[in-house]
Amino acid sequence: MKKIVIIGGGIAGLSAGCYAKMNGYDAHIYEMHNLPGGLCTAWKRKGYTFDVCIHWLEGTSSNSPFHSIWQELGVIQDKKIHYQDVSVRLISNGHVVNFYCDPDKLAKHLKEIAPEDSEAIDELVYTIRKAYTLFNMPLTKAKELFSVIDKLKNIKSFVPYMKFFIKYARMNIDEFAAKFKNPVLKQAILGLMVDTQFNEFFGVPFMIATQGCGFPEGGSLNFAKSIEQSYIKLGGKIHYNSKIEKILVNNNKAVGIKLEDGKEVKADMVISAADGYSTIFKMLDGKFINKKIRNCYETQPTFPTYLQVSIGLDMDLSSHSNLNNSIYNFYKLDKPIEIAGKEHRFLSLKNYAFDPTFSPKGKTTLVAGFSCKFENWEKLSQNREQYQQEKKKVERAVISFLKKIIPNIEDKIEAIDVATPLTIVRYTNNWKGSYMGWANPFSAKISRTLPKLKNFFMIGQWVGDTGVSGAAKSGRDSIEYICKKDKKRFITTTP
Ligand SMILES: Cc1cc2nc3c(=O)[nH]c(=O)nc-3n(C[C@H](O)[C@H](O)[C@H](O)COP(=O)(O)OP(=O)(O)OC[C@H]3O[C@@H](n4cnc5c(N)ncnc54)[C@H](O)[C@@H]3O)c2cc1C
């Protein structure tokens, strides 16, 4: 039986492990952490779950092309899924704008706020409908296996979107917001991207088009653990607390891995589901690159990193009039908060009261989040005291903001925790703490194999397969690719 070693037990690695087992390979996942899931994670404090990842999971509803992957991985069948009708709620100076996922409902709501902006609203809704059709395009086989005909068919499937891409791909958000006369809507559109360091409008329709993307009860870590359980049930082996230092190469063939403790493990095939930078430049010493790869790592911006303040409250906020029981509430701050040298004008607040597993009965988990600049935090971390002080400062800023919404909130805090971009790096090894890989996976255009290196494949967010569903699909693709190389029929079974 051929042995496949998979570096990283995030969603991409777990998925590759499951499909490897379904296809009769001897699969071993090596994960540096003591838990599965990578970025798709959560932690517990005093009975509260502090979740960091899933807001919207593509493929929870049966009409999504990703649904079959979750079925194959055996993780969706028994899960209760929570759906929200609002993708993002923007609260600014007492005005509330609900970005409903349903385009008709959204158009009606926005036109009630600003009938004078009817034309701009219709244009926004048009882009959201386009995003939905793109999200619902059937999944293809692994792109490495495309024949010329497949490539032509793939190009053809994008032809109806050419006008859409040409018009909006380069439009910046200010340009789009300028189409609105109503100051509340203008502000709301700008607010959607304001703290993310992105200036492109393109992110907006994809952010709102979340109808049918649910939240699996129990949250991100629970979801990752379900895939881990499927993998173990299929006979896969997962080795925790096992950081990989090198990928062993002989005659331009990956032949195994070397762990941090010096132990070597031989394999017929190595799949890296770990951070792209460390895979290419550390584990492989930068020996298998070309100009395109170097250029990508030198010039392409990474997706921003993230800071999270998680709070366990001895209060039931499931129906509080001042705080919606929903996943994304963006508040415009009266006074910007400066965090590690970056000014934040908005605060995103998640209220997890909709999931009863997140906190003891009658209590609530809240999460405030900020997009951050990694370099600033990296610099701060060099001085332990300053780093801790900055964490305290954010904690205080979030509490004083919350006090304006719920005056007695401070006395009700039972648990509080600040996770910084450095926490992301420590727990997942992601380059610059990025939580989606590249800022623009289309312009990064990274290949999943490396020049001149055989028996090796890369998967996950650093090869453009972003998000939880993208990561799972790339795990599937890697095994489909290996089966083809081994002249085996690729099979899927439900565990
Ligand atoms: C705040 C936040 C919100 C998000 N919201 C969503 C959302 O709503 N929907 C969505 O679909 N996605 C969302 N994402 C993104 C999603 O979590 C990621 O894109 C996806 O989980 C990436 O999976 P991956 O397997 O490619 O990488 P990772 O999760 O980074 O997994 C890589 C794994 O490799 C391990 N590893 C790294 N180096 C080594 C080494 N040397 N040796 C051994 N192991 C190693 C790491 O520990 C990790 O477990 C969000 C992420 C965050 C942080």
Image (spheres, rainbow, N blue to C red):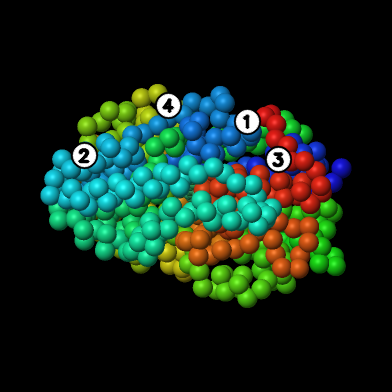
Residue labelled with disc 3? 19
Q: Is residue 339 visible?
A: no
Residue labelled with disc 1? 74
CB under 8 Å between callouts 4 and 1? Answer: no
Whether 274 is drawn above or below 65: the answer is below
Q: Amino acid at mark 1?
A: Gly
Give how far apart the Cα atoms at labels 4 and 2 are: 29 Å
Residue labelled with disc 2? 109
Q: 323 and 126: which one is in front?
A: 126
Residue labelled with disc 4? 356
Q: 200 and 353: which one is in front?
A: 200
Asked where in the image residue 337 lies, by quadrant, the reply is bottom left
Give how far apart the Cα atoms at labels 1 and 3 are: 12 Å
Residue 252 rendering spot, x and y as whole percentages? 81, 67
Camera-near label (4 vs 2) is 2
Q: Earlier in the sequence, mark 4 or mark 2?
A: 2
Give how far apart the Cα atoms at labels 4 and 3 are: 32 Å
